[in-house]
Image (cartoon, rainbow, N blue to C red):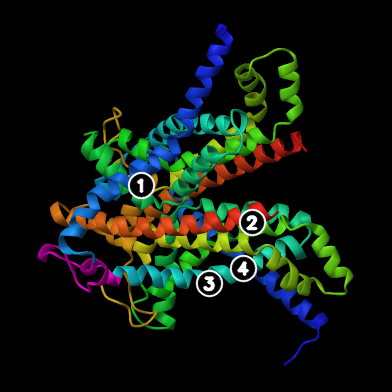
Amino acid sequence: MHLNPRHEQKVIHFALFFCTLVTVVILFLIIVFILRKGLPVVNSKFLTANPVDMGRAGGIFSTIIGTLALTLLAILVATPLGVGTAIFLTEYTFENKITRIIRFGAECLAGIPSIIFGLFGFILFVNKLKFGWSILSGALTLAFMILPTIIRTSEEAIKSVPAAYRQVSFSLGSTKWQMVTRVVLPAALPGIVTGIILSMGRSIGETAAVIFTAGSALRIPTSLFSSSRTMAVHFYILAREGISMSNAYGTAAVLIIAILMVNIITYYLMEKFIRKYS
Amino acid sequence: MNRLERNEKLIRLALLVVAFSAVSILAVITVFIFSEGSPIMLKYGFKNFLGGLDWYPSEKSFGLLPMITGSMMVTLGALIIGVPFGLGCAVYLTEFSSKKLRRVVKPIIELLAGIPSVVYGFIGVIILVPLIRNTLGGPGLSVLAASIILGIMILPTIISISIDSLLAVPSSYREGSLALGATRWQTVKMVLLTAARSGIIASIILGMGRAIGETMAVIMIAGNAISIPGSILDPVRTLTSNIALEMGYASGEHRQALFATGVILFIIIMILNTAANITSGRRRRRT
């Protein structure tokens, strides 16, 4: 059958629209499914009680604490490194061999699967440096994993600060570092924060890299060296070992809500940032 | 040299050191994975690792061929599902839809990337696996189930990079083609897909990397049987699941063999990364 171009155009238009529709519908189905099954389980007791009997009963409080501790520590480690790299790439150098190597390194790091990060963190932090399964091992592994995201988003944010800002700062006699810290960074801050929140989302949902480095202890962590279970790991263990389906759904609902919030905040900040400079 | 100038020099040096953090981390990861994984490969021979069909770590038999085949099969399946849908979405959002719709749909698709892989795996187990078992037969936990879920998971990668590269095509190309009387679709087919080719290829390579590297979702839905699957309804084990399933209790040579699995995975990923870098680099130079 041979279609004339006008009909072909119509058919294709519909087919492409269908692709987009299916993608969006899949996303909604996933979110609605998890929330409908999980939200009835989630109440203040579920959020504030510790898991009892391996998670068969009780809530998920200790895993929320574990997730927060790991995520915040990872951000704390990765942000100075990532923003520093971005400042160097945008303000302190020209495109040359060195920047190409740095960019290639960051791109490769971004492509490395989380299970490889898990293996690496296990052998270096847990075994060789003797941190054991701990918040510290898990957070350092996560920090390495989110570093490329922070570099890329910070670089874009810094690049989008208009050149005029820099010229004015220089003309007032500031040094480069004064210009960076007092003019460029404050202007680029919303963009940088966007990247940080985006990587928080990635840390919250990460399982493979965390399970072999932070372990899966259900107690509330007391120090950097205590093992801790994150929500994602808890959800995985509950679902995979069939410990409690209703608690698995509840944990998944909390995870999804956290991810949704992260994405909405990111989107909001990004819109504001783009509007400011365009 | 005054104090300010000296400070500036020091700051620049400090930033240079920081800027090498990503490269150094990459180097350290490479060194650790290889130093843990390669001795055992040398001891038992690369050929036995890459070509062996049997994985019985307790009997010192470390054949990874079933897992290598498994990873290849689910990745290929993910591409067969993810690429047409992803490209379709990207073309629709850049060339057919209104700008307003794109601004609404793009963040939604990015949200798809934020959903944790354990949630995808769980959805697969609860909805997709029973569906396949009841309609097509077999155990349900299968190459097909893993391919479908991975196909969905790589959509955001393919869509957002393809959108960027389609938007980077100068609008004079579109106008020229439309002025010659081509329909929108003919313009896409004959002009835009060619002009944006390298970016689209890079998006597919990166999606491939994501599919090969995915672990938790695959463990939950692929069935993890150690044999080369005869059909897409058979269960399969990938390189990543092999590591994650046994890492918890492995020790000695068994653990080293899991690191060797990591070495093979790492090499595949680095080849893909380099390929993506080269294709997108070519695009950057050309435009």
In space, the residues marked 2 and 4 are separated at their CA atoms by: 30 Å
Position of residue B52 relative to residue A37, above or below, is below
Q: Quadrant of the N terminus of chain A?
A: bottom right
For marks 3 and 2, the one nearer the N-term is 3
Q: Residue reaching furthest left?
A: B59
Q: Which residue is mark 4?
A: A22
Residue B53 colored in magenta in the image: yes
Q: Quadrant of residue A194?
A: top right
Of labels 3 and 1, the one closer to you: 1
Residue closest to the eye, B238 or A87: A87
Q: Which residue is mark 2?
A: B283
Q: Position of residue B41 (x, y in %)?
A: 21, 59
In space, the residues marked 3 and 1 are separated at their CA atoms by: 28 Å
Question: Is there CB contact under 8 Å for labels 3 and 2?
Answer: no
In space, the residues marked 3 and 2 are separated at their CA atoms by: 26 Å
Q: Amino acid at mark 1?
A: Phe
Q: Residue at x 66, y 25 (%)?
A: A184
Of labels 4 and 1, the one closer to you: 1
Q: Which residue is mark 3?
A: B81
Of labels 3 and 2, the one closer to you: 2
- Magenta region, residue range: B47-66
Q: Amino acid at mark 2?
A: Arg
Disc 2 is placed on an element classified as helix
In space, the residues marked 4 and 1 are separated at their CA atoms by: 33 Å
Q: Amino acid at mark 4?
A: Val
